[in-house]
C-alpha cells in the first residue's frame, strides 16, 4: 500500500492515570481490545474538546480542561478496523484519586462494555490492548 492509499481514522483520546500510575482502559462492545477513552471529533471540535466529550460519554467522568496535558499526535494500526491507521491527538490526565474510587464513579456508557486499570509496565506487549496504546503511548509514558 503506498502512502496515498493509507486510510486514516482521526481521533482524540485521554490517557487517564490514577494515583498509583495505572492507566484506565475501555473496551467497546463487540471488540476484544482495550484502549484509552476517546473517539472521533464532531464538526468544529478541537482535539481537546473531543477528548473531554468522548471521555465523559464513555465513562461518565467529567474532566477539568485545565488538567489536560498534550502528549502528542500518535499513530498506529487501528485495533478494530483492519486496513486503517488511527491518528490520535493524545492527552494525559493524572487523577489524584485511588483507582477504586474512580471505578466506583465510572458508568460505562455509549459503546463501552468494560473498563479496567492496567499497570503501566503491563502495557507493553499486551495482546488485548490496542496497538496505539502498546506500541506508541506506553513507551511515551514509560520514558
Image (spheres, rainbow, N blue to C red):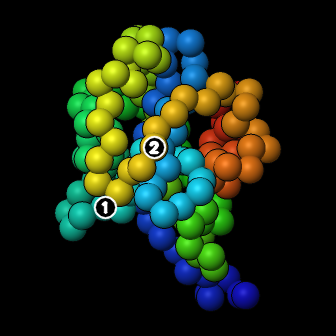
The image position of residue 29, as x and y in percent, is 44, 58
In the depicted view, which residue is nearer to us: 34 or 17? 34
Q: Residue at x 48, y 70 (%)?
A: 9
Residue under numbered circle 1: 41
| Quarter of the C terminus within the rendering | top right
Q: Which structural element holds mark 1? A: loop
In the depicted view, which residue is nearer to us: 52 or 123? 123
The image position of residue 108, as x and y in percent, is 34, 42
The image position of residue 55, as x and y in percent, is 33, 42
Mark 1 or mark 2, whichever is nearer to me = 2
Residue under numbered circle 2: 114
Rate crowding at label 2 as few (under 14), some (14 to 19) or many (20 or more) other CA atoms within 10 Å.
some
Q: Residue at x 57, y 18 (%)?
A: 21
Which of the 4 quarters of the picture holds residue 40? bottom left
The image position of residue 104, as x and y in percent, is 34, 22
**Spatial separation of the CA atoms under disc 1 and disc 2:** 22 Å
Q: Which structural element holds mark 2? A: strand
- C-beta proximity under 8 Å, tags 1 and 2: no
In the figure, is residue 115 to the left or right of 3? left
Amino acid at each position: 500500500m503506498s502512502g496515498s492509499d493509507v486510510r486514516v481514522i482521526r481521533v482524540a483520546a485521554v490517557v487517564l492515570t490514577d494515583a498509583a500510575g495505572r492507566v484506565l482502559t475501555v473496551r467497546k462492545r463487540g471488540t476484544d481490545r482495550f484502549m484509552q477513552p476517546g473517539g472521533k471529533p464532531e464538526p468544529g471540535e478541537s482535539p481537546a474538546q473531543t477528548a473531554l466529550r468522548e471521555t465523559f460519554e464513555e465513562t461518565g467522568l467529567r474532566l477539568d480542561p485545565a488538567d489536560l496535558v498534550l502528549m502528542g499526535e500518535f499513530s498506529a494500526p487501528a485495533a478494530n478496523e483492519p486496513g486503517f491507521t488511527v491518528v490520535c491527538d493524545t492527552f494525559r490526565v493524572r487523577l489524584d484519586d485511588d483507582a477504586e474510587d474512580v471505578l466506583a464513579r465510572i458508568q460505562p456508557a455509549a459503546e463501552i462494555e468494560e473498563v479496567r486499570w492496567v499497570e503501566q509496565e503491563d502495557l507493553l506487549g499486551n495482546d488485548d490492548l490496542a496497538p496505539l496504546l502498546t506500541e506508541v503511548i506506553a513507551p511515551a509514558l514509560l520514558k
